[in-house]
Image: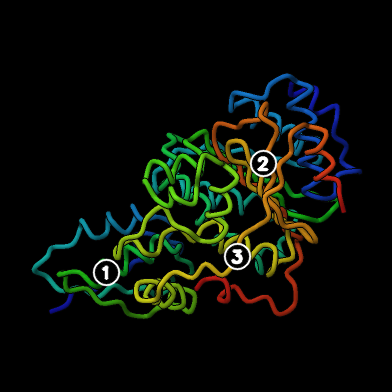
Amino acid sequence: MKQIINIQEQYGAELHTRQMMERLAASLVPTNEYLLDMSGVAQISRSAADELYNLTHSDMHVDLINLEPFVEKMLSAVTKGRFLPRQHSAGDMPIIHCATIGSLQRQLMAK
Amino acid sequence: MQRICQDMTNSTDIFSLEDTLSAFFDCVTKGNQTVSAEPFLQAMISVFHGQTTTLVIPFSLDDESTAQVIAKLKEHLTPYCPDTLQLLNMPLTYLLDELICNIQQHAQADKGYVYLTYNQVAKTIEILIADFGITIYGSYVAAQKHLDKLGDSDAEALNLAQNGYSVKNLPDTENRGYGISSNMKMVVDGLHGEFAVLSGNALMLDVPNKRAILALPPEIDFKGTMIMVRIPAQVPDGFNLYKYMS
């Protein structure tokens, strides 16, 4: 029998930090099976989603149900992040050396 | 120095992040306070404070504080732009989550500072997130990552950060290191805002028509990291947060 945990009731509608998810993981019994009911959780940070990924891909028996759209997208993004090489698509930024406060101010004011 | 900064600012003539930064650097150099971190932060807050309604929250880096600080910031904005806040809620939360998380993960600081302003004249939301930690350069050095690219330069460290180079590179931590790069893209490209990072002896600026890292004069060296964001309180048509999450 899987135990259902309502995440919104226990942790709120926004999951912000890794520590929050680490607390959740620590509260679970490894031999039990869990369904984490994510209904009502509207927002999750990348860090929290990353820890949730760790939890659902660990030896624990944990599945997620009722994902809200944002949470689903973020979990999808962190899952992709595990398998795709990191892209450095922004490219280098020019580095301008300002030897004096005057040259710094000129750079800031240049349009 | 706070008085000097307040005297130098005027709510009617500061409309860009560059103006704010220019007033800030004027302030710290004229105030003769270019070394220690706290006067730097006070100076920046004073520059912002000259403009509009303000809110400063020092926060400890545990998870309850993070949740509370984000809720408090959004609550503060509600009376000013309730409709916009509804639209900005998700990107704003995403932004604050990532930037606060960066401090938790990398700064080796015991607390952070968030300062938020709604500029009623320019109709922009202005956010300052700061720590007195080891700087972005220091976090690469502490992790012994990308030292070949880094040299001894705060400016190179900012360049790596904006290009998504993480201080971690392990399979189980691969989703770290997006904070600055993804948020800069979202703020500047997506929300048509402005983004700046001051860390150590360098300033990164991503504003309309200017995208550069300024290696600062030697007398300016902030012992920590400050991120300044300015977002119009008007979400552009077609903005899609999901585009910036991958």
Q: Are marks 3 and 1 in contact (CB under 8 Å)?
A: no
Place of residue A31 in the rendered image (x, y in percent of width and height, measured from the top left): 8, 68
Which residue does the numbered mark 1 point to in the structure image? A5
- Name the element at disc 1: strand
Tell me residue B8's x, y (percent). Answer: 85, 30
Mark 3–mark 1 distance (CA, rounded to whole Å):
44 Å
Whether labels 3 and 1 belong to a single chain: the reply is yes
**Which residue is the site of mark 3?**
A91
User: Residue B108 lies in what quarter of the image?
Assistant: top left
Quadrant housing the N terminus of chain B = top right
- Is the residue B155 above or below the residue B8 in the image? below
| Mark 2 belongs to chain | B
Name the residue located 15 percent from the left edge and 74 percent from the top edge.
A33
Q: What's the residue at 71%, 40% (across, down)? A: B54
Q: Is residue A8 visible?
A: no
Residues at marks 2 and 3, CA–CA distance in whole angstroms: 18 Å
- Assess disc 1: are there few (<14), some (14-19) or many (≥20) residues with their C-alpha within 10 Å of its C-alpha: some
Residue B190 seen: yes
Q: Nearer the viewer, mark 3 or mark 1?
A: 3
Which secondary structure lies at badge 3? loop
**Residue ID at (60%, 32%):** B222
State the residue lying farthest toward the left: A31
Q: Position of residue B146 (x, y in %)?
A: 43, 52
| Residue, disc 2 | B215
Residue A109, image x, y percentages: 86, 45
Q: Nearer the viewer, residue B95 or B79?
A: B95
Which amino acid, mark 1?
A: Ile
User: Numbered disc 1: what chain?
Assistant: A
Q: Nearer the viewer, residue B61 or A100?
A: A100
Q: CA distance from mark 2 to mark 1?
A: 51 Å
